[in-house]
Image (cartoon, rainbow, N blue to C red):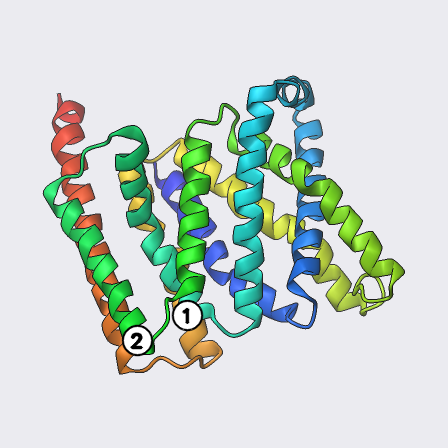
Amino acid sequence: MKRGIVSAAVAYALWGLLPVYWKWLREVPAVEVLSHRILWSFLTLLAVILATARFGDLKRSAGDRRVLGTYTAAALLIGVNWLIYIWAVGAGFIVETSLGYFINPLLSVLLGVVFFRERLRPWQTLSIALAASGVLYLTLAYGALPWIALSLAVTFSLYGLVKKTAPLGSLEGLTLETGTLLLPAVAFLAYADVNGSGAFPGAGPMTCALLAGTGLVTMVPLLLFSSAARRIPLSLVGILQYIAPTLQFLIGVLVYREPFDLTKLVGFGIVWLALIIYAAESFIDHRAHFLPASQE
């Protein structure tokens, strides 16, 4: 279990540090960075699939129309999520992206109620209401919806909803998703190269290396997370997931000096209170249901 905790913590820490990586590529258009991420992620994941002799299973799954439809929907959602995130980081909205991933777990719970008829416990209802009030406060204070945060939360929550019914493992699933997006990504990169607007391969060795490395920065935390998810309880995974948006928030405020005034502090504070209540309630509920059985 200790190994699982370490793997999960490292995975979430790597996801939390991703803004630094995308900042290094801020001079490259977000759509081009996304296209490279899709291309190099697919190639990297495919290499792992081939090395572990799982290509036959992946090929059979890709031939199933229902499976392909599920992963096409997942691919579109994660593609939009990646694009918004990459653009937002480069444009100086790291703090708002962290808000999206703070909200995401609570939105996922709400989607479970809507689509799977899951029942909300009283403290979960309070958490969701508090988070909504925090977003409403920020909206009224600034006169506009925090659309980056909400877009990231909605797309990633819906992505999780689709993946909940998906039959493949995370490695095979992401390979199929990036494979689904591969043709438009390659077409865009070819177009950018032809009209001279592409950054690869003429932007210098550092930028080219970073673009090619997008496959690794996508795959490594995914593999660590997949390993951890099999070893530790989901309630613990749920608590550890806040490592990523916390690091994103700290990087935005402390490293890139994004503005964070009293108004934002109040709005974020309400959302953080909601998350504290949600995490504590989930942990207590998990112990109440599973600890007695484990002590028998």
The three-letter code of the residue at mark 2 reads: Lys
116 sits left or right of 166 in the view: left
> According to the image, label 1 marks what residue?
95
Give how far apart the Cα atoms at labels 2 and 1 are. Answer: 10 Å
Pointers 2 and 1 in contact (C-beta within 8 Å): yes
- Residue at horizontal 14 percent and vertical 41 percent from the top: 284
Of the numbered discs in the image, which one, if any, rests on residue 264? Answer: 2
Which quarter of the image is occupied by the N terminus? Answer: top left
Q: Residue at x 44, y 47 (%)?
A: 156
Which one is nearer the viewer's eye here, 277 or 114?
114
Query: Residue 86, position in %: x, y?
Result: 57, 61
Circle 2: is it few (<14), some (14-19), or many (20+) Cα within 10 Å?
Answer: some
* 53 lies above or below 247: above
Mark 2: which secondary structure?
helix
Task: Examine the rendering and report whether any part of residue 3 can be seen.
Answer: yes
Residue shown at 59% from the left, 30% from the top: 172
Query: Where is 13 relative to 264, above or below?
Result: above
Q: Report the side of 289 relative to 137 (left or right).
A: left
**How many numbered dots are placed on residues in this image?**
2
What amino acid is labelled 1 in the image?
Val
